[in-house]
Amino acid sequence: MSTEENARPDLQSDQTEPDQTPSDQTHQSDLLEAVPPAEEAAKVAIAADRLSLNYAGRPALDAVTLSIRHGLVTAFIGPSGCGKSSLLRCFNRLNDLNDECELSGTVTINGEDIYRPDVDVIDLRRRVGMVFQRPNPFPKSIFENVAFGPRLQGVKSMAALEDTVEWSLRGAALWDEVKGRLDRSALELSSGQQQRLVIARAIAVKPEILLLDEPCSSLDPISTLKVEELIHDLKSRYTIVIVTHNMQQAARVSDYTAFMNQGRLVEYDSTDVIFTNPKDKQTEDYITGRYG
Amino acid sequence: MPGLKVSRRRFTPKSWISGSWISLSSKLATGTVIAIIVAVLLILLSGAVSYFWPRPIYEFWVERSGEAAVPVHGIIAGKENAADGSARLLIRSVTAAGDDPATPGTDRLPAADYVWLPETAVVQRSRPHHLTAMETRDGRWHWGYVVQLQVDGEILAYTGSLIDFSNQLLAADCAAQQHMINALRPARVADACSDAEFIDWRLLFEDAERRQVTVAGADILQLMQPNGAGLLDRIASFATHLVTFRSPNRYAPHHGQDIVAAIYGTVLMVLVMSLVVSPLGGLAAVYLHEYAGRGWLATVLRVAVNNLAGVPSIIYGVFGLGFFIHAVGGRFDQWFFADKLPVPTFGTGGLLWAAMTLALLTLPVVIVATEEALARIPRSLKEGGYALGATQSEAVRYLLWPLALPGLLTGMILAVARAAGEVAPLMLLGVVKQASSLPIDGNFPFLHLERKFMHLGYYLYDLAFRNTNLKEGLGLLFAVALLLVVVVLVLNLSAVFLRNRLYDRYRKLMS
Ligand SMILES: Nc1ncnc2c1ncn2[C@@H]1O[C@H](COP(=O)(O)OP(=O)(O)O)[C@@H](O)[C@H]1O
Ligand SMILES: [Mg+2]
């Protein structure tokens, strides 16, 4: 039952007022009710435990503890600079690239501590795909962009690569738009198409988890809508964590929402609860636009 | 729209003046730079053109101290105004006054030399159409008239115009006389001996002093009547002389072959240097940017790279001499060419060591340019690679390296420009005035990197020292200088072309 414990959206004990402790329990029951098949819901994809992170001594995350459920969409919201991206990048160890970055606490994915020294980071990053705020297609053809990941894993057969590329582009709802010009440069696509291409590139390596860091912030409304629909479609196959600035988007696409502020996890609950009945004053202020 | 306020930029006199001052001065500066470049090119071009352009031959009638006027044939090489207002002409000619270095003997004409003629002494000057310039095999020039042409002892019908005569020969289609036509066509520089269908022909030549000499056709390199030639013939003559790099006006024995050898040497050295410096510079830049981090070693390396660019090139020459030639080359000889010692193979100056030294010289430029290109690559691109499970070396190889290539080529463009113009270090590293063999030929292994080589820059340097103060000599100098500019330009443009093709691919990403 320890996973059950972890699944409980955790409120920071140091900032939780004493009278909130009972509501904490209400929380838990709410959450369990919110997810119909109980066994499925109990599966935890990512769990962070007292995760803290400093950039050259400046704290960016402060003892964040949360569990992200398997097969659902979890949204991170919060004012910019509050550490959403930093937290996301802990889940695929992308922070390792930054020498100034110091980390404490643990992150487990499917029960496995990903910061153990013997973990294969390359394989971890394959299993945990990531899409960035600005579309970052490689300066290669559309085909090569999607085939990049499979090629890295040693797939050489052209037929297999073609299959994967088509499957991924269909998965990212881009196939119909680009099927005739796979050999054209990816840089010729519109930014909305580029973002879907990047998603296709991410799912081409068949990850279990997709981390989307403000995937729509540089897109126009129509492209945003397409990406949101895509997230809906992908939901059945992947565990998705999405960072967003857009409150409506979080409400539309996510099952669970975590509100963060200044490196802390303030409130984490089912999206319905967060948007209709937030427990924390800060959360309420933020989602009603009274923040700051 | 009511209430919509258009913000106006406020112009104060001060901002207007300073703004326009900057734009004006930047325009002026650009204009000046362009003007200087154009002026340099024009000077080189005019010098070079005048070197290959067939100049008119004059017949001067010169009167000296009351004596009867005598004819002098020659080319005007210069003019000088004295302080007292009188002018004198510099003539390349066989002097009429008898102070010429004439070879004794009747069958040889005196060779041309420079003489000064006071302008007042010239009572008449003209450019007779049939006045002929003859270059003989010994490299001398003579001016006069062709009086008679004979083939196998038979005198041919000849009106005085070589052009008419060669046209007649051509019309007659007598293949046996091809050689004669070759020598007679004013545009041709004939090589009599190489001609298979050799016939015995000779001509009777009369100089300004009415001395007549019979000259064998085999001794004649070229015959020209530039005064009578039309524009097309002159252009043809210019073009042929340009290609063979010989002047139609003055003695220039080996230039044609020398120039070709020097072009080969220059281009080959630059190519070998590029082959050495591009991987070296590119990999060093990748190392500095991607792997070195911020440790003291990286700092030392960066400081060294940035400062190496400022070291005078002769110091590289000394280094190349000490390190490459003596240390490395000497060792090479002991290991691989011991049978030839004490004659050194690699233990002496040669193309390889010159190219290696220039590669070191241009290394900083290449590293800096490549590193700048690497720094311009958006971080997100690399992260995108890592997020897909790329290792560092895969990210470098598949994502960073292709994008660094345009920068590397920019570095190569700068490196080529610098290397092709560098002379000082080469003098220590195997460049020679005259090379007996090219560094590339048909003998295995075709590319002979150990050979000494000629170089346009050094050739120019040598020419400038050999040439006296004669203005006419500058023609060749300018021609070689222009050629060097053209060679550097061609090398550069090919690198630019290559880079632009790469840029096209990545432009959208970089903007
Ligand atoms: N690479 C970095 N180096 C130093 N500080 C960073 C770096 N990335 C983020 N930060 C800092 O960490 C804090 C959290 O940033 P981030 O996770 O990007 O916030 P968010 O994504 O919520 O806007 C910010 O104060 C930011 O300035
Ligand atoms: Mg962010």
Image: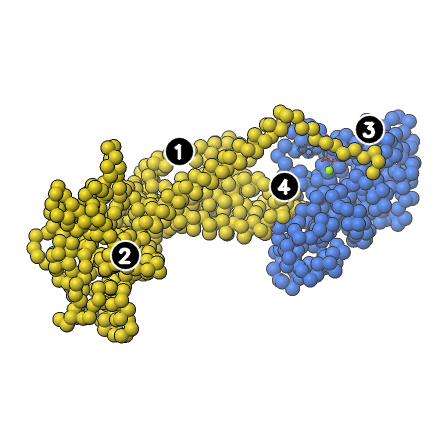
Chain colours: A blue, B yellow
Viewer-nearest residue: B133 or A242: B133
Q: Is residue B462 visible?
A: no
The span from disc 4 to disc 1 (Cα, nearest Å) is: 34 Å
Q: Is residue A127 above or below residue B228?
A: above
Mark toward the start of the polypeptide (2 vs 1): 2
The span from disc 2 to disc 3 (Cα, nearest Å) is: 94 Å
Measuring 15% from the left and 58% from the top, which residue is drawn there?
Answer: B206
At label 4, the amino acid type is Arg
Q: Is residue B156 above or below residue A196?
A: below
User: Is B381 displayed left or right of B99 in the figure?
Assistant: right
The span from disc 2 to disc 1 (Cα, nearest Å) is: 54 Å
Labels 2 and 3 in the same subunit: no
Residue B22, how many percent across, how many down?
Answer: 56, 31
Mark toward the start of the polypeptide (4 vs 1): 1
Residue denoted by label 2: B227
Q: Residues within 10 Å of mark 3 (few under 14, many from 20)?
A: few
Residue denoted by label 3: A292
As drawn, the label of residue B379 is: 4
Secondary structure state at the residue bearing disc 2: loop
